[in-house]
């Protein structure tokens, strides 16, 4: 009998109970022990839920109040100096001081950096290693969880990040080689393994998603060194890879003293038969057959066909698992009340994915496929559904593919025409789009949804917000204005709700970081636009001012990256559909007299594949998608884009190929360092490097802003530069936004004079 297991389960709770409890605790509304009780209850509930769904081996160690990588740091005593307590002990609040910079108790100090967990939308806290970093078993709360699992009589495995992935995720001071810390880290892992042996744990799953990357020889060797040197004793070791194909490394891995290897069978195509031949018969081959990254009902018939030969040969040495942790998936589909029943039957959330593993296990066991055949019926129905297929969209895509996506006049010529129309001063000032989203705006939307106010009242109130934003920008003397995005709950959801092909869940929350969760829209079918989405708000704003107002759209690559995509169409094709829908909106804005249109692509970089050899292919279609929605405009219409991050060096050629007339980027925090990329590459179009950090409530100093602009002017011709904050202002208060923008405009005025 093969074993079913999940690689990890969401910890936030089906209704975000953990989020609530955390925020109450941070506000002082509940005690530490109340928060800990909530954690304990959620763990027990999630284990029970998985067991009832048919999981044989439940994960322990996947829970975290804030972040599981942070937990690993605490486990080994990796605490940045500024967060260490006088007695050297790790208290409960330490995780929040590291994660958020402050906690109900203990000193406040800058939080650790957060970064994306591989290509997911989950953010972990980057471990900070010093040159002499020691790793000693320190925080033992993991062992309490083991005791809890034992007390419940669970059949469990322990789940932790593997040493190489953990080391890879961390950062060291400049000049220190991270790999030089490996021996010390392995010492810590050995202490852990010894303690797990003493605690009688049977299985340990060590997660090594680094194997999905193209590792340098030194890092490949680190895998060998680690798994050869660790003495596992009685413990059985499952090496878990995920997020990509690891075939290239398999020949080396199968010689390691392991008890099993987990393969992700859904992230990338993988030659399962070849892997099966390589993996020795005494190893467990854990087949990550159910996709942990998306919300679609699994095609169990196909899975059965794939796994049957392996099962016949391996029997109980074949395990059935989720491709990766279910952390990246919402908890429970049964809570959804508002999805059309037909559409709902196409989905499976975390709990349902566990049930799928059970169904598959039974079918393999009995050789009876009846249950899985009927489970897969909705998939057939989906194939033919008119909710999915729109032949007009498909034809438009085919036509588009045959056409060029470039603007017909080169930048150097069209910028002159744009300037003739816009008459902008040297160093034009603008903002990134959103103005403060106060709680009354959010309430307005809730009131509208609940029917407490009419559509008309809603419109009036939003128009008031727009007028307020325009008045403020005119008073401040900004050159290119925005309407402020008051009508948008979220930059993806707002458009998704107006496009055909999208649906929305009520409880489809996924943890992004700490207590923060996102509810990604779901792309179920071909995407089309049936009406204007932004034109009336933008035109209204433009009617209030003589200055140009920028239209504001979310780009196709970001729309795709922040949604759950369909799987029967390539990402490139979905992006193309989104792009064509957005192109119509661009046209409509232009026809309404809007001269500048910004198409935001903050997720452009994060879409890069994990394997660098696949980057170019992604960049090709991503750039193409951007161009298709931005190129069919008059020469004099100015296209802007915005990206809020600072690593451009390695994709600068693709950024330039997008051929936006103006790009605004994040540079204030890195002190304009990243402009180096634009200097070496001789970026041809205009750039607005952010001159202050909108994430901070502090009002930027005049001299500081001037110094940054001067620095930028040292690297790029003045005529190429714009002046703007580094991102949207929606998280700031009106007072903060006004004060900061006033400084920005003033700094710019002084510089213009000095330069003249
Ligand atoms: N236009 C958006 C805003 O200003 C951009 C947000 C983003 O970059 N994430 O809010
Ligand atoms: Zn931004």
Image (tube, helix red, strand yellow):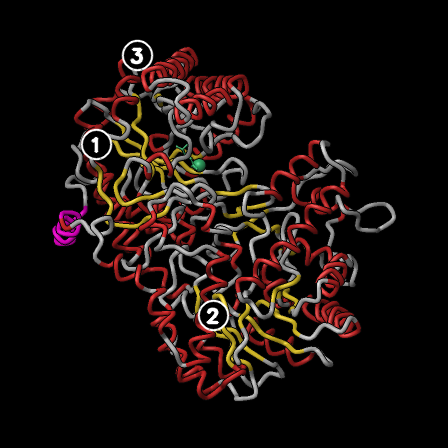
Q: Nearer the viewer, residue 738 or 556?
A: 556
Q: Position of residue 429 (x, y in %)?
A: 39, 23
Q: Is residue 73 magenta?
A: no
Q: Secondary structure at mark 1?
A: loop
Q: Which mark is residue 288?
A: 2
Q: Position of residue 553 (x, y in %)?
A: 31, 34
**Residue identifier under label 1:** 531
Q: Is residue 439 above or below residue 361?
A: above
First of labels 2, 1 by sequence position: 2
| Cα distance in 3D space between marks 2 and 1 | 42 Å
Mark 1 crowd level (few <14, some 14–19, many ≥20, 10 Å Cα): few
Residue 203, picture quadrant? bottom right
**Residue identifier under label 3:** 544
Q: Provide the residue span drawn in magenta.
A: 392-405
Query: Taking the image as drawn, is residue 430 in sight?
Result: no
Q: Is residue 489 above or below residue 185?
A: above
Query: Taking the image as drawn, is residue 686 in sight?
Result: yes
- Does the magenta stretch mainly form a helix, a strand or a loop? helix
Q: Nearer the viewer, residue 398 or 226?
A: 398
Q: Is residue 395 magenta?
A: yes
Q: Position of residue 514 (x, y in %)?
A: 60, 44
């Amino acid at each position: 009998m093969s074993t079913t297991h999940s690689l990890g389960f969401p910890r936030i709770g089906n209704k975000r109970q953990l989020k609530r409890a955390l925020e109450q605790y941070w506000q002082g509304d509940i005690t530490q022990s109340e928060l800990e009780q909530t954690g304990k209850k959620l763990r027990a509930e999630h284990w029970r839920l998985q067991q009832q769904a048919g999981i044989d081996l439940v994960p322990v160690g996947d829970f975290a109040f804030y972040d599981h990588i942070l937990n690993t740091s605490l486990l080994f005593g990796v605490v940045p100096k500024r967060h260490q307590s006088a007695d050297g002990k790790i208290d409960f609040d330490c995780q929040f001081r590291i994660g958020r910079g402050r906690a109900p108790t203990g000193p406040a100090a800058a939080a650790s950096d957060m970064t994306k967990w591989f290509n997911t939308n989950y953010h972990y806290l980057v471990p900070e290693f010093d040159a002499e970093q020691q790793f000693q078993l320190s925080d033992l709360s993991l062992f309490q969880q083991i005791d809890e699992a034992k007390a419940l009589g669970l059949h469990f495995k322990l789940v932790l990040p593997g040493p190489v992935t953990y080391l890879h995720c961390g950062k060291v001071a400049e000049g220190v080689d991270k790999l030089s810390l490996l021996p010390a880290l392995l010492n810590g892992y050995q202490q852990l393994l010894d303690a797990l042996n003493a605690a009688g744990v049977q299985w340990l799953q060590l997660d090594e998603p680094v194997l999905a990357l193209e590792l340098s020889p030194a890092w490949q060797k680190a895998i060998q060194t680690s798994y050869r040197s660790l003495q596992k004793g009685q413990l059985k070791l499952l090496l878990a890879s995920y997020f990509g194909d690891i075939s290239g490394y398999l020949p080396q891995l199968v010689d390691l003293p392991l008890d099993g290897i987990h393969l992700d069978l859904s992230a990338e195509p993988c030659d399962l038969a070849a892997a099966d031949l390589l993996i020795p018969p005494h190893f467990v081959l854990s087949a990550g057959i159910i996709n942990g990254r998306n919300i679609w009902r699994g095609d169990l018939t196909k899975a059965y066909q794939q796994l049957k030969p392996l099962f016949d040969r391996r029997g109980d040495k074949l395990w059935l698992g989720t491709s990766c942790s279910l952390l990246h998936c919402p908890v429970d589909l049964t809570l959804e009340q508002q999805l059309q029943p037909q559409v709902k039957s196409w989905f499976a959330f975390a709990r349902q994915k566990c049930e799928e593993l059970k169904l598959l296990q039974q079918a393999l066991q009995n050789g009876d496929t009846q249950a899985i055949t009927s489970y897969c019926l909705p998939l057939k129905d989906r194939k033919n559904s008119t909710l999915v297929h729109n032949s007009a969209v498909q034809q438009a895509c085919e036509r588009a593919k045959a056409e060029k996506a470039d603007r017909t006049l080169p930048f150097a010529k069209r910028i002159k025409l744009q300037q003739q129309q816009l008459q902008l001063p040297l160093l034009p000032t603008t903002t990134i789009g959103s103005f403060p989203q106060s709680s009354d705006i959010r309430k307005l939307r809730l009131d509208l949804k609940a029917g407490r106010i009419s559509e008309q009242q809603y419109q009036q109130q939003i128009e008031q917000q727009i007028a307020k934003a325009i008045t403020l920008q005119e008073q401040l003397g900004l050159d290119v204005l925005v309407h402020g995005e008051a009508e948008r709950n979220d930059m993806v959801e707002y458009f998704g709700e107006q496009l055909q092909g999208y649906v929305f869940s009520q409880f489809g929350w996924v943890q992004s970081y700490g207590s923060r969760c996102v509810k990604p829209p779901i792309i179920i079918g071909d995407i089309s636009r049936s009406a204007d989405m932004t034109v009336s708000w933008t035109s209204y704003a433009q009617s209030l001012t003589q200055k140009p107002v920028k239209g504001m759209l979310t780009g196709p690559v970001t729309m795709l990256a922040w949604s759950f995509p369909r799987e029967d169409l390539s990402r490139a094709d979905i992006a193309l559909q989104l792009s064509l829908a957005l192109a119509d909106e661009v046209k409509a804005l232009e026809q309404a007299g809007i001269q500048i249109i910004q198409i935001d692509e903050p997720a452009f970089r994060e879409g890069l594949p994990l394997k660098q050899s696949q980057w170019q292919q992604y960049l090709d279609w991503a750039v193409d998608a951007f161009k298709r929605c931005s190129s069919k405009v008059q020469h004099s219409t100015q296209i802007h884009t915005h990206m809020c991050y600072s690593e451009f060096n390695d994709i600068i050629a693709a950024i330039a190929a997008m051929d936006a007339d103006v790009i605004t980027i994040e540079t204030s925090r890195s002190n304009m360092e990243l402009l180096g990329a634009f200097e070496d590459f001789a970026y041809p179009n205009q750039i607005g490097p952010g001159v202050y950090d909108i994430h901070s409530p502090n009002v930027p100093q005049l001299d500081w802003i001037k110094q940054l602009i001067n620095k930028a002017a040292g690297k790029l011709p003045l005529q190429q530069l714009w002046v703007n904050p580094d991102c949207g202002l929606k998280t700031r208060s009106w007072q903060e936004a006004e004060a900061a923008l006033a400084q920005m405009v003033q700094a710019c005025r002084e510089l213009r004079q000095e330069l003249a």
